[in-house]
Amino acid sequence: MIRAKVNITGTITKEAVVRTDKNHKSYLSFILTVRLSDPKISQKEVNIFVAMYNGKQEDLSILTIGKQVVVSGEMDIHKKEDFSFYLNAEKYEVQQLQSVDAISGSLIFRGRLKNDNIYEEKNDKNGNPYLIFSAYSSEKHGEEFFSTWVNFMRFPEKGASIDTIKPDFMKPKATLSIIGDLTISSYDGNIRISSIVKEISEYQKTEQQK
């Protein structure tokens, strides 16, 4: 599971329309396109599929093609062959002056560590230690499983040993729950998700989930 509380700055590329979900609840639906800078290909366009349940009729005349807006809400991240981003919007604000597109917020992640070499110790330019590691979240589409990798950094408290951020549960194939800052970027046209860890714990299924 990969979910995020986000603020997204982008441009509407499919205007808002009223739709009804399977429970017969109405919502506003539109597509927000975010142009991420990319050192290899100049920029990468990412489409965010937005649903806004608290939208009003008058919002339809505002949420039109070409408008740059900042939209806030909860976003689910899925991957099959490519990434899909679904935002349950809580509010929006029209940008009066053109701003740089961006996706920022906090990440909620549940997934599994690698089979081996699960983390690497690094030092920043001031000699302060930190860990880098990757973990993946899998989901099933048809008969196939698709994995989404997230790159994590974790820093100890100021002056603390790096051993304080290497808990016993950080073992190969361990399943983790992580909360951290969210960064979505692009390199050579490939979307990358990364996070600085704020909270980490071992995830254990409840009896109902087993």
Image (cartoon, rainbow, N blue to C red):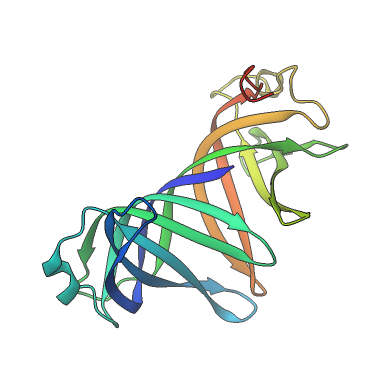
Judging depth in this view, the residue of 142 and 136 nearest the camera is 142
Q: Quadrant of residue 203?
A: top right
| Residue found 59% across the figure and 42% down from its top | 1
Q: Is residue 96 visible?
A: no
| Residue found 55% across the figure and 63% down from its top | 84
Give the percent coordinates (x, y) of residue 142: 72, 57
Answer left or right for 199 relative to 18.
right
Give the percent coordinates (x, y) of residue 48: 44, 66
Note whether 205 is above or below 135 in the view shown.
above
Judging depth in this view, the residue of 56 and 190 nearest the camera is 56
Judging depth in this view, the residue of 51 and 23 nearest the camera is 23
Give the percent coordinates (x, y) of residue 148: 68, 52
Note whether 196 is above or below 141 in the view shown.
above
Answer left or right for 175 relative to 96.
right
The quadrant of the picture occupied by the C terminus is: top right
| Residue found 64% across the figure and 58% down from its top | 79
Answer left or right for 61 relative to 68.
left
Which residue lies most toward the left here?
58
Give the percent coordinates (x, y) of residue 57: 14, 66
Answer left or right for 109 relative to 176.
left
Q: How many marks?
A: 0
| Residue found 23% across the figure and 73% down from its top | 63
